[in-house]
Image (cartoon, rainbow, N blue to C red):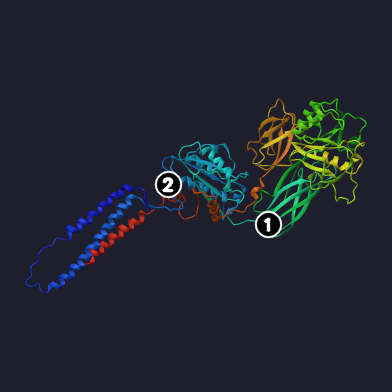
Amino acid sequence: MQFSNPYILWGLVLLAVPIIIHLFNFRRYRKVYFTNVRQLQEITIKTRRNARLRNLLILLLRMLATAALVIIFAGPYKVDKEKQTNAPSGRKIVSVFVDNSFSMELSDGNISLLELAKARALDVAAAYAASDRFQLITNNFSGKTQQLLSRESFIDEVHNITYSPVFRSTPEIVARQKRLLDTENGAKECYFISDFQKNTLIPEQMDIDSSYRVILMPLFTEKHPNIAIDSCWFETPTHRTGEPNRLFVKIRGRGNEALQKLPIRLMVNNKQSGLGNFDLAPDGEIVTEILFTVHEQGTHHAWVEISDYPVTFDDKMFFTFAITNKIGVAELSDNPRQNYLQTLFGSDEAFQYEKIDVKRIDYSLFNQYSLIVLSNSDDVSSGLASSLEQFAAEGGSIAVYPSTNAKDDSFKELFRKFEIPLDGLQLDTSLLRFGSLNLNSDFFADVFERMPKNMEMPSASQHYHLLSPIGSETLIQFENNDPALIKIPYKKGKIFLFTFPLNEKYTSFPHQALFVPTMLRMAFTSVQSNPMYYVIGEDEMLSVRNFALVNDVAPNVIAETGTSFIPGVRESQGQYIFYMHDNILNAGFYTVASALDSLHIAYNYDRKESELECFTKSEIEQQIHNKGFKNITVWRESGIPIAKAIAELYQGVPLWRWFILVVLLSLLLEGIIIRFWK
């Protein structure tokens, strides 16, 4: 037991008052004369004993009543030692996080979890003084979260909270709190009001100041099953008119029942273009595919959708895809008689092939190509090397066939540009066959339905020994395990480096069956297209190549509803970066439009919010205990108003009512003794 005003306990000296009264009141005697006292002697002895006991009890009861009165004014209270903290004095800074993510749409009886969370936040505000200041944080992370509010303004903002599509983890929220709280003076108290999904609470990453007092207020509802479209992707990165497109859709289920023949629908440009169905095991995942054909060129708006209740935000996934005329392929060579690539790409309508003399190159046209093949060039100028490096850095793909007559300096300069190690670089003139293909690589995915056992492999009589760069991937190797083809990621692009020349004098590769799928795969995977979709709250920065602005004036981002905003813009390495600044809050299609150009994009809600499984109170307490947090308390319902419970949590449970009862009982017993004990 502790006291709010311990100095009042000096009033216990008043216990001397009933003692003094006892001594001077009960020891006064008066004489009564009797003619014969013989019969009274025995009675007198018994009466003195009773009187002494009676007077002692009255004395103790009066002392008890006096002590209880003094303790009442001293403010007695009891504090739970597990939750005990020193109550701060002065102005308090109270930070309240209200989870307004989509999972809070679920209801606890007749009220949604969000409405319950808002009510909790209002109750928290009522527990503090009007002079205290408040920080309100929601998943939106709006600018208002970085300023302190009065209690009245805080209450108004709580009433205005609506659902947010943005997913936030507890470490992100704590970092947001600290950004403001660390700049303020006063006692810091933080409240987290959430359903605490298992993918949001990450104690090991929470950097909570030990001087903060933190209360976690979990909200619970019954477990709901949920089916969500997790992601989707195409079989190939390129699409052509009139040809089938294979779309893969990944679907996740969370529930205890197996589901069968659930329908899924594909819409393209507001027209139904595909149907399918799928089976789903309990708590299972499935990848289903939909075939469809598009006959018009340009960018297309599409979405796949399922039907599920009560969680519906993850039942639809929007995406865009483009059907372009041709893929640009340029061959840089100083050998006009070599025509292997011209035969392959020049006769295919899917490609726009151009052969360019390495001595007559217009570097400004490089952005028209997806793939540039440097074929057996004896001399690579510093200007060409720099232009190729910039082309790859901006996302282009380069295939390099080295020349056996290459000038050492120019050849090495190109390697240095792409950070390819030169140690051990030497020409090997022994005849070697290709040994194996890296069929586990994405490069060869779906290229071969099955690999022939006795497939005739190409050979090369000259190749370069070299060390594979860090992060590279060997796609083809010789029978002595030397690399024949290496894929090297470089910034936003990639380099395909052959270690042998493209010359039938030194290799049979252009005459073998492997040549065609290898080069076609390079061209198809080199196509630079924008992502099919972005994620709200996660993809706030868009990198775009080949977008035209007028005098670098920022474009407009226009939603389907007609609303628009101006994004931030920065130019970097020949491309524009657009910053959305949390302005996109609804899933759907958006157009980035300037006076000269337009770009169609799709945004979807974060699928992390589809995982509805939440921690229980006991699990949260165990997590906090395991991480050693001493200043974090998990709220438990006690049946009393939250404002009162908060006061008791930090100031203790007041005991003055019990001591009033002690006073009343003492006075009652004293009266009974005086009245009936003669």
User: 484 and 350: which one is in front?
Assistant: 484
Q: Mark 2 points at which residue?
A: 86
Q: In this view, does 56 lie above or below 220?
A: below
Mark 1 belongs to which amino acid?
Answer: Asp
**Residue 341 pos. (x, y %):** 89, 36
Mark 2 belongs to which amino acid?
Answer: Asn
Q: Name the residue under label 1.
A: 283
Residue 192 is at least partly visible in this image: yes
User: 127 and 474: which one is in front?
Assistant: 474
**Residue 205 pos. (x, y %):** 58, 45
Is 241 placed left or right of 568 in the picture? Answer: right
Q: Residue 24 is drawn in which quadrant?
A: bottom left
Q: What secondary structure is found at the residue carrying circle 2?
A: loop
Separation of marks 1 and 2 at Cα, in angstroms: 46 Å
Crowding at label 1, few (<14), some or many (≥20) Cα neighbours within 10 Å?
some
Q: What secondary structure is found at the residue carrying circle 1?
A: loop
Which residue is rendered at x = 26% and y = 64% of the image?
672
Is 68 placed left or right of 212 in the picture? Answer: left
Q: Residue 476 is drawn in which quadrant?
A: top right
- Answer with mark 1 or mark 2, whichever residue precedes in sequence: 2
Q: Is residue 212 above or below residue 286?
A: above
> Which circle, 1 or 2, is nearer the viewer?
2
Extreme residue in the left direction: 35
Q: Residue 567 is drawn in which quadrant?
A: top right
Is 475 placed left or right of 256 in the picture? Answer: right
Crowding at label 2, few (<14), some or many (≥20) Cα neighbours within 10 Å?
few
